[in-house]
C-alpha cells in the first residue's frame, strides 16, 4: 500500500527528473542555435560590407528567427533595411530593439533620424532628447535636435504664405523643410500644389511621384500625376499613370472616368499620326476631327490637333481651310513654328509670296536653326522672283497642286486654240509666242524632275539658271519648230 506521503514524494521525484532532462536537452539545442545565429550574423556582416544587401538581409532574417530575444540581430537587420532604402521596414525592428534596450542610444539615434526624415518631428524630438539624457554630449543627437524647431517654423510659414496666395514664398519655405524631411509626403503634396498653381507642372509631378512609394496604395497620387501629364499634352504618359491607379483599384470612379477619355483620345491621335506618316491625309483628317470631339478645350491638345488638321489640309491643297486652321493655332500660341511653316506652304500654293515670306521669316525668328523655316523662306523668295518671269502654271491656267492629267488636258485645249496654223486672229506672232509658252509649260510640268525644280523656284528652261540650256525664250533649238503651213497633229 502506498501512503499519501510516499505518493507525493514519488510524483515530485519524477517531475524533478523530467525537468532536469528537459533542461539538459534545451542546453544542447540552445548551444546549436547560438552557433547558427552567430554564423548568420557573421555572414550577414561580411555580405553587408561587400554591398550584397539582399543576401545579407536573408541571413539577418535567419538570425532573428533563431534568436528572437537578441536585440542586436534586429538592430543589424534594421541597418540593412536602411541601406536598401526601406525605412518603413527598419522602424519596427528599431522599435523592438528600444523595447528590449531603452538605453541603446544608437538605435534611438537611428529611429530619430528616420522620424525626422519622415516629418514626424515630435517623435524625432523625443528620441534625441532621450539620447541626451543618457549621453548629454552626444553630437549626433544635438545636431539633429537643433534642426527640429527651425523646421517647424518653416512649415508654419509655408502654410501661412499659401493662405495669403504667396506661393513663391511658400515654395521656398517648404523646400527648406523638405531638405530636412525628404520622406514627408504631406510636405511634398503642399509644395506640389504650389508648383501647380504657379504653372510649373513638371516640378509638381516631381513632388507627387515620391509620394507613390511613401503612401501605400496611393491612387490619388497616380490620378493627380495622370491629370498633370494630360495638361502638358502628354496623353500617352497620362494613360500609363491612370492605368497604375486602376491596378490598385479597378473601380476607382475618378481614375476610371479619366481612363476612358484619355484612352479614346490616344487611339485617335495615334491613328491620325500613322495616316500622316503614310501620307493618307483624308484618313488622318477623319481621326483628327474625332479626337477634336473628345478634347478641344485644353490648350496643348487644341494646338496639336488643329496644327495637324492645318497640315493635312495644306497637303490636300485646301489652302483656304489650311490658312484658317493655322491662324487659329497661332491665335492660341504665337510661337508655334510648325503652324507658321504650314501656313507659309499654303500661301505658296495660293502664290501669295509676300505672306509666305512673312510666315517663314516669323518661324525663322523663333528658331534660326529650324531647317524647314530656312528652306521655306528661300523657296518663297525664289518663287517670288520667278513670278516676275514666266509662270508655267499661269500659262496653263492651273493651280500649283494640279495633277498631271489636268496639265495635259489644259495643254491640249490651249494648243488647239493657239496653234499658229489654226489661229484665226490677226496677230500671228502673238499666237506663235503663246504656243511656244504653252509647249514649254507642258514640257516642264509634265516632267516630274523639271516640275520639282520649277516648284522650288528654278526654271529648268531659263538659260540664266541652267548652264547648257537652250537659250532665248524658246525651249527648242533653232527657234519655233513649225514651218508655215505645217499640219500639226496631236499624239498623246
Image (spheres, rainbow, N blue to C red):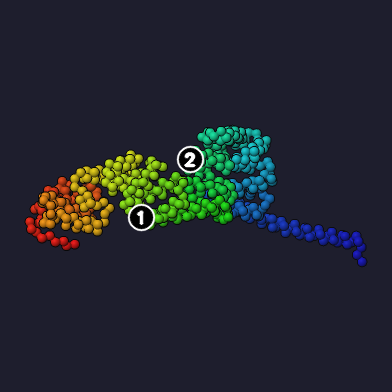
Residue drawn at 12 percent across, 54 percent down = 424
Q: Quadrant of the C terminus?
A: bottom left
Q: Determine whether, in the image, residue 362 is placed left or right of residue 482.
A: right
Local crowd at mark 1 within 10 Å, few (<14), some, or many (≥20)? many
Seen in the picture, residue 448 relative to 141 is either above or below; the reply is: below
Q: Quadrant of residue 106?
A: top right
Specify the label residue 281 is tagged with. 1
**Where residue 340 sits in the image (x, y, percent)?**
34, 44
Residue drawn at 64 percent across, 52 percent down = 64
Residue drawn at 67 percent across, 52 percent down = 68
Mark 2, residue position: 200
Q: CA distance from mark 2 to mark 1?
A: 36 Å
Q: Determine whether, in the image, residue 226 is placed left or right of residue 372.
A: right
- Residue 431 visible: yes
Looking at the rendered structure, the secondary structure element under dot 1 is helix
Seen in the picture, residue 278 relative to 163 is either above or below; the reply is: below
Specify the label residue 89 is tagged with. none
Q: Quadrant of the N terminus?
A: bottom right
**Where residue 421 sits in the image (x, y, percent)?**
11, 56
Residue drawn at 35 percent across, 40 percent down = 366
Q: Nearer the viewer, residue 162 or 152?
A: 162
Local crowd at mark 2 within 10 Å, few (<14), some, or many (≥20)? few
Q: Quadrant of residue 150?
A: top right
Looking at the rendered structure, the secondary structure element under dot 2 is loop
Outermost residue, left side = 484
Name the N-terminal-most of marks 2 and 1.
Answer: 2
Amino acid at each position: 500500500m502506498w501512503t499519501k506521503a510516499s505518493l507525493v514524494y514519488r510524483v515530485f521525484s519524477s517531475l524533478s527528473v523530467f525537468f532536469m532532462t528537459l533542461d539538459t536537452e534545451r542546453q544542447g539545442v540552445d548551444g546549436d542555435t547560438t552557433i547558427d545565429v552567430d554564423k548568420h550574423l557573421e555572414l550577414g556582416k561580411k555580405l553587408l560590407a561587400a554591398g550584397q544587401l539582399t543576401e545579407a538581409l536573408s541571413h539577418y532574417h535567419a538570425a532573428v528567427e533563431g534568436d528572437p530575444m537578441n536585440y542586436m540581430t534586429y538592430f543589424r537587420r534594421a541597418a540593412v533595411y536602411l541601406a536598401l532604402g526601406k525605412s518603413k521596414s527598419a522602424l519596427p525592428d528599431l522599435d523592438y530593439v528600444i523595447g528590449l534596450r531603452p538605453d541603446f542610444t544608437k538605435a534611438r539615434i537611428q529611429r530619430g533620424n528616420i522620424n525626422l526624415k519622415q516629418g514626424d518631428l515630435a517623435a524625432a524630438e523625443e528620441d534625441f532628447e532621450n539620447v541626451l539624457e543618457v549621453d548629454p554630449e552626444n553630437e549626433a543627437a544635438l545636431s539633429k535636435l537643433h534642426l527640429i524647431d527651425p523646421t517647424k517654423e518653416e512649415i508654419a510659414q509655408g502654410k501661412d504664405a499659401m493662405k495669403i496666395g504667396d506661393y513663391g514664398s511658400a515654395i521656398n519655405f517648404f523646400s527648406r523643410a523638405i531638405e530636412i524631411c525628404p520622406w514627408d509626403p504631406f510636405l511634398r503634396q503642399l509644395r506640389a500644389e504650389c508648383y501647380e498653381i504657379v504653372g510649373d507642372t513638371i516640378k509638381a509631378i516631381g513632388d507627387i511621384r515620391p509620394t507613390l512609394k511613401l503612401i501605400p496604395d496611393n491612387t490619388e497620387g497616380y490620378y493627380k500625376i495622370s491629370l498633370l501629364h494630360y495638361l502638358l499634352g502628354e496623353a500617352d504618359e497620362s494613360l500609363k499613370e491612370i492605368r497604375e491607379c486602376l491596378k490598385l483599384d479597378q473601380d476607382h470612379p475618378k481614375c476610371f472616368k479619366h481612363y476612358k477619355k484619355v484612352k479614346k483620345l490616344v487611339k485617335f491621335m495615334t491613328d491620325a499620326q500613322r495616316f500622316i506618316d503614310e501620307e493618307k491625309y483624308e484618313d488622318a483628317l477623319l481621326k483628327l476631327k474625332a479626337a477634336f470631339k473628345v478634347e478641344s478645350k485644353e490648350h496643348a491638345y487644341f494646338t496639336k490637333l488643329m496644327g495637324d488638321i492645318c497640315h493635312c489640309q495644306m497637303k490636300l491643297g485646301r489652302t483656304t481651310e489650311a490658312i484658317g486652321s493655322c491662324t487659329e493655332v497661332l491665335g492660341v500660341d504665337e510661337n508655334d513654328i510648325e503652324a507658321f511653316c504650314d501656313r507659309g506652304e499654303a500661301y505658296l500654293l495660293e502664290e501669295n509670296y509676300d505672306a509666305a515670306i512673312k510666315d517663314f521669316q516669323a518661324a525663322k525668328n523663333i528658331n534660326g536653326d529650324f531647317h524647314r523655316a530656312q528652306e521655306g523662306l528661300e523657296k518663297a523668295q525664289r518663287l517670288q522672283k520667278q513670278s516676275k518671269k514666266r509662270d508655267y502654271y499661269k500659262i496653263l491656267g492651273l493651280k500649283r497642286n494640279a495633277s498631271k492629267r489636268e496639265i495635259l488636258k489644259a495643254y491640249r485645249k490651249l494648243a488647239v486654240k493657239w496653234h499658229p496654223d489654226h489661229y484665226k486672229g490677226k496677230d500671228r506672232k502673238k499666237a506663235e509666242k503663246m504656243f511656244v509658252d504653252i509647249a514649254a509649260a507642258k514640257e516642264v510640268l509634265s516632267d516630274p524632275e523639271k516640275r520639282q525644280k520649277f516648284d522650288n523656284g528654278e526654271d529648268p528652261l531659263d538659260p540664266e539658271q541652267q548652264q547648257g540650256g537652250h537659250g532665248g525664250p524658246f525651249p527648242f533649238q533653232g527657234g519655233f519648230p513649225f514651218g508655215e503651213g505645217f499640219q500639226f497633229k496631236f499624239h498623246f
